[in-house]
Image (tube, rainbow, N blue to C red):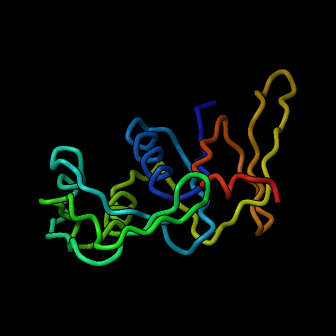
Amino acid sequence: MPLMSGVVGGRMSGLSAVHWLGSVGVPTTVPEAQGRVGGHTLNVHFEASDCGLDLGLELTAQHKEGVFSFEDGAGQVHRIEGGPRNCADAQRFSAGAAGLAQELVSGLPPVVQVRLEAPVEGLGLSLGDGVAQDRVQVRLASGDKLEANAIVLALPPRGSQRR
């Protein structure tokens, strides 16, 4: 039986994982709770060789005035008045970070399926019978069950907590 995988979460980390899995031909399903991919994104300065320019995205100058805010790993929100002025030559994608997420999805091979508005309700293990191997089971809110040899959990820390 060929290797099949699941990537839970269509955030940037999940899209990066599925982009690689798809590029090596691994059939993968990506359930994403929201009606779009990309999750919460943050524009940061990239070197041109490290970003999505090869996907055909254009860069535009980034504004350096205003308020810069972010949430740290402990959940505390920080505000920096005046914006990130130390980014002299900062640029961003004209289509924003969401454009990068959309380009990643549009370039995925046919072995990858992204399912939007498909929240995950639970994970389980489907034990093999000695002939068939054990499988990871992903239970969706719709009642559908996805099975895979392996899964990647690409969730924010809060999203991975048991509710």
Foreground of the two, 116 or 99? 99
Please tell me which residue is depicted at 51% across the width and 62% down the height of the picture: 71
* Relative height, residue 137 to residue 63 (above, below): above
Return the residue found at the far top.
130
In x, y percent, where is residue 41? 42, 64
In x, y percent, where is residue 90? 18, 61
Residue 109 appearing in the image:
yes
Q: Quadrant of the N terminus?
A: top right
Report whether 81 appears left or right of 147: left
Q: Quadrant of the C terminus?
A: bottom right
Foreground of the two, 162 or 36? 162
Foreground of the two, 137 or 61? 61
Please tell me which residue is depicted at 40% across the width and 35% down the height of the picture: 24
Q: Would you identify the image quadrant in which residue 4 lies?
A: top right
Please tell me which residue is depicted at 72% across the width and 60% down the height of the picture: 120
In x, y percent, where is residue 25? 44, 38
Residue 38 appearing in the image:
no
Report whether 26 appears left or right of 117: left
* Relative height, residue 148 to residue 131 (above, below): below
